[in-house]
Each structure stands twice: as C-alpha cells, then as structure tokens.
Image (spheres, rainbow, N blue to C red):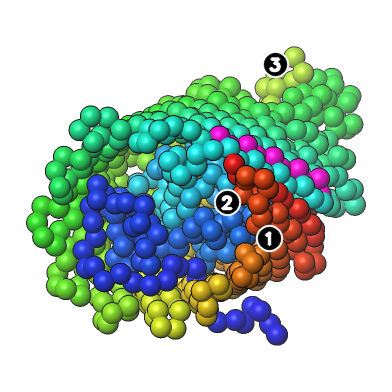
Amino acid sequence: MRTSRLLPLVFLPWGIASAQTSPPASALSEQDFLAPMPIVLSVSRLAQRLDETPGAVTLLNRDFIRKTGARDVVDLLRLVPGFQSTTSFETDAPMASYHGHSTNVANKIQVLVDGRSVYSGFLTGSTGLGWQTLAVDDIERIEIFRGTNSATYGARAFLGVVNIVSRDVATTHGAAASVTTGENGVADLGLRLGWGESPNAFRISADSRSDDGLRKVYFNGGRAAGDNRVERVNVSSHFVAGGGAEMEVRAGAVNTRATTGDTESPGNAERPRYLGSRFLQLDWHSVLAKDQDIAISASHTHNAISDRFAFLDEKYKYALGGLYYGTLIEQEGQEANDALSFQHTLRPSEGWDLVWGAELRREQIVSARGFDTRGQVSSDFLRLFGNGQWRLAPRWLLNVGALAEHSDLGGDSVSPRAMLSWQLAPGHTLRAGVSSGFRPPSAYEKYVGYRFYDIHGQNPTPLYVRGNPDLVSETVVARELGYLADVPQWGVSADVRVFYERVENGIAQIKTIPLQYVNGDRYEITGAEYQVTWAPTRQTRIFFTQTGMATRVDAIATPGAGDGYMPYMDADRYFSLTHGIPRYSASLTAMHTLDNGMSLTFMYNTVQDIPLIADSVHLQSMQRSDVRLAQPFRLGGAQAEWAVTLQNLDVPYQDGNAHFYFDRRALVSLRVHY
C-alpha cells in the first residue's frame, strides 16, 4: 500500500467549545490550553480559540512531542503541512522552512521562544541556532502559524511564525533526569530541578545531545563522520507581585559544535565550527480591569559564530610567492540583539477584542572579516501594531490588523491583513482573507565585504562577496481560503488551506565577480495543504498531512551591465527557483496506548521532487519511517519511562545536502522524575 497516497490531513486538537467570544489574556487558565478547542496566543497577539484565528494553525502539544521521540524541534516540523527540514549540522544547524526554497538557511519564517525572537541576522539571516534554544523535554507546546504574519510580527515573519512555549515552572517541581544512547554515536543527557512555593516557582535545566552527524559522501568517494554536540542550560522563574501583577524571568545559553567540511578538500577543509547564544528575558503582565491588561517584555540576546581553517591547496604553495598558502579562511562574528515591547489588550465593547502596542529593537553585528571596510553594522527597528477581532454576527467573525515598521535595513513597510470567518454550522468554519508580508535584507546581504588576506594579514585580494546598499525588502501578498471542521461523534477534526502567494522583489545571490545580492525574483506559489486528526478510540490518535504546491516564475534577479555576470547560470537559477519547493509532501503519525500504559508510535513522511542545497539542477525525493515503543513504570518513589526508537526504517536518504545521508538509527531512552 502506498503510504504517500493516504487521505490528506493534519494535526489539530479535536472538539469545539460552545463559547462564541474569546476570553481576554488575563482570564486564561491552564484549562484553556487543555480544552477541546484550545486557545492560541501567538497568531495575532490576542488569546483566540483555534477556530477564530486569522489563518491556519498547527498546534503540537507536549504529549504528541514526547511520543514522537524527536530529539529537537526541527525533526518534529517535518510532520507539519508545508514544512521541509534537515537534520544536518554540517552547513549551519538543523533547519526547517515553510514554503521555502532550498538554501542552507531558513530566513523567511520567524521563530519565537516564549515570545522572544531567536532570528539571527548574521550572514543572510537564519533561525538555525534559535531552533536549539530549548531541550524537547522543556517544551510545553508549539504554535505554528502557516502563512505570512508580518501584520503581527513585522520583518522576517514572511511566510510563517513558529512559537515554542516552554513548560510552566509551576508544573515542573522536583527532579528529573533523562538519558538516550544509540547508534551513530547518539549520547544525550538531561537534568532538571524545579522548586518553590506557590505562586512563586523556579526551574533550572541542563542537557547535552551529541552524535556522529550525517554520513558524508563527497565526489572523491571519501567518507567522514561528523561530530555534533549541543549543550544547553535554561533558568526560568515566576513571581506574583502586589495587585496581581506577574513577572517571569528567563535566562539561558546554548552552544553547538559541529564538524564541517571535507577531509580531502583544501578549499573546504574538515574542521570544527562553533555557534553559541546567550539570552536574558523579562516579561511583566498586569491586569488593569476585567477586560484590560498590559504586558511589557524586554530581552537581550548575544550570538556568536566561529568557523576557520587554513587554506592548504598545493597549487598555491609556490604561486604568488607562497603568500596565500596557509592563509586563514574564516567566518567570525558577534551579534547583540536588544528588544523592548509594550502591548495593551482590551475589550472596548461586546463583540470587539483589540490588542495594540509597539516594539523597539536594535541589532548589532560585529565581524571584521564579514564587513571588511565597516567592521560592524547596527540596525534599529521601530514597530507599531494593532490587531482586532469583531463579532459581526453570532456566526460571522472579522479579523483585521496591520503593522507599520521602520528599519535601517528595509526602510518603511506596512503590512495589513483581513480575514473573515463564517461558522456555517456547529463545528464547521470557513475563512477567507488576504495578508501581506515583507523581509528586509539582512545586514550581510546589504553591507558584506568579504575578501582574503595573505598569511601575514596583508595583501588583500579583490572582494569575493559584495553587499548591495540599494537592496529593498522583498514582499509577499497571500490570499487563502480555509476550512476548519470538528466532528466529535466521528472523532475527526481537520484544517484545509488553499493558498496563493505572490513574491515581489525577491532577494537573490548572483554569481557575478564578486558575488553580490540583488532584488528581482518574482514568482507565485499556489497549492493546498490539509491536516486531519482521527481518534477512533480514546487510546488512539492518527494524524495525516498532505501538501501539493507549484511555483510559476515570472522573473529572476539579474545584475546590472558590466557586473561580470555568467549568463549560463540563468537556467540553473530558474530551475532552482521553479522547483525550490516540493511538488508533493505528506506525513502520517499514529499513536496508540495500551491498557498497561505502553505506547506505540509510527511516523512516516515523504517529500517529492525538490533540489538539495549542493545540487540545484536535479530533483530528489525522500521517505522516512520511524517507530517508537515506550513503557512507563515505577522506580522506587519515582515515575519512569523507557523507550526504544527506530529512526528511518527505509533506505538512507540525502538530507539537506547531496553529500549527506541519514542512515538507520536505533535509540534507547530512560526518563525518571522524582
């Protein structure tokens, strides 16, 4: 039986509550997030029922996350409609993109961790390091908005937003430990300690995950194992002050070290690469009245990258006086991001819910090598936003919103959105709307000046990569029709999205001499995706997703005359842009729990016809099947669980890069909670 032809579907919670008006954020409790029709917070900054959001949302809860056996967030997102992912650390860090084109970065979606942006502006922009902020055991749920959301978050929310929400510190008292070991050098260890007296609570968690990376196969037939390690520590606390005001303070750090490069290539020598991040975040929330509250958030994030090796190509040993034999090839940089935001949520009248606010953000990148003549780039962002939902009639709901942004990188931008929902019958909601988004150029795309120096740090070469100060923001206009259904008597819920996304002024790297970035890509993405949950019994959950997409390219970016452009690359770029999204993808997740508590999970996903990072002129396909078996038990006075996970029961597949293969793996895990 061909699993890729299964019914189209997606993971959504089941059931629909009967209330017609969403509660204000101040009225939310834990039960709101556990209700049959959950409340989500990250779509419009309003607390909204899932059937009232202005677009398609996938919600992954802690039980689902735990039963997949995934070791990080990116590996989970391959089960979400429209997402593509790679587990490779060799080019940056594991990446996930939504309707994104094949690159080694994912710079067209916004990733939030507890509301804090973890988007890094270094290089062309990336969320790779941000995905690694939290260990899977520290995640409560993941809210995924599938579609442009610049109307809420501005720059970078170009094609979607993923908000990773950590577990409430009040629910993690006691000590917990976990260990995972298995093939391919997998060795993971996690520790957590929570304490405090209600309403004040504290938690500290630390973990490391390591493996031998993907199997690497290069054109010369050489093979080399990687050596990947992620180390994390996170501290969280919750306080209640006088008058009912609440404050949360979070701090953490993540280090990733990965082996990258080719053992036999002097131009890409094998070496360790480091990515690291540190952050401090403070969130303050106060209830002003029954239908009003305010929230203030401040954060500081520091990111660093270190990647260097000596260029030892023998043909340069005596050429040019030997000055460039052994010269240092490096990518080094420090990044500091500071953000301060204010938002006011209110209900001015029955049937109206509003949120408005402002955000100030400063991003500073220091890189002597990346910004050869500047050394550093500072960028300021000012955002003003407002979103509201208006109950036009008992069955009609209008979501409207807009964000205005000024930045040093992208200038002035405005992103409006309007979405109309109609509950045609209890448990059945139709939605239709239009929204716009933008992504300003990164500091690297706009100001990079990359060249090489000799072994004495002198005699610079001509520029290898050149920025373009005239770059403007790329934009997208999205139109969509949606259908959300919940049929509790059948145990079925479903979400269907039909979309049209028009991208203008797309930013592309052009292979001129030197390499440079220009605006000019213009293309359309059309397609449909859906997700369905079926619960035939209380102990069984089955999740299906399917996505079909096509791209029509109207124009590709080209440089000006006299830029040394190589016209033969036009065909390659056209092919890559046309096929930068998979023609078809699907996933199936089935979970069943026996009467004795033993759980069995089966996961399958396939991606058809997409080029990989290192091969933009050939289409690849993949499929992967995983199985997990877990049994809870008592260990003295502690709750414990052992689990066995088999990853990729199918044949090895190329993962992200044509040179990297994901082989079969068997893992054994043990978790203990006192």
Disc 1 residue type (three-letter): Ala
Residue on which the image places disc 2: 73
Of the 4 image quadrants, the one containing the N terminus is bottom right
* Residue 423 in view of the camera: yes
Which quarter of the picture shows residue 351? bottom left
Q: Nearer the viewer, mark 1 or mark 3?
A: 1
Magenta region, main secondary structure: strand
Image position, residue 23 (x, y; %): 23, 56
User: Can you tell which mark lies on residue 458?
Assistant: 3
In this rendering, the answer to whether 25 lies above or below 351 is above
- Residue at horizontal 75 percent and vertical 14 percent from the top: 456
Disc 2 residue type (three-letter): Val
Name the N-terminal-most of marks 2 and 3: 2
Q: Which of marks 2 and 3 is in front?
A: 2
Q: Nearer the viewer, mark 2 or mark 1?
A: 1
Name the N-terminal-most of marks 2 and 1: 2
In the foreground, 32 or 543: 32
Residue on which the image places disc 1: 630
For the residues labelled 2 and 1, the Cα–Cα distance comes to 20 Å
Left or right, 15 with reference to 383: right
In the foreground, 654 or 179: 179
Which quarter of the picture shows residue 263? top right
The stretch in magenta equals 184-193
Disc 3 residue type (three-letter): Gln
Which quarter of the picture shows residue 12? bottom left
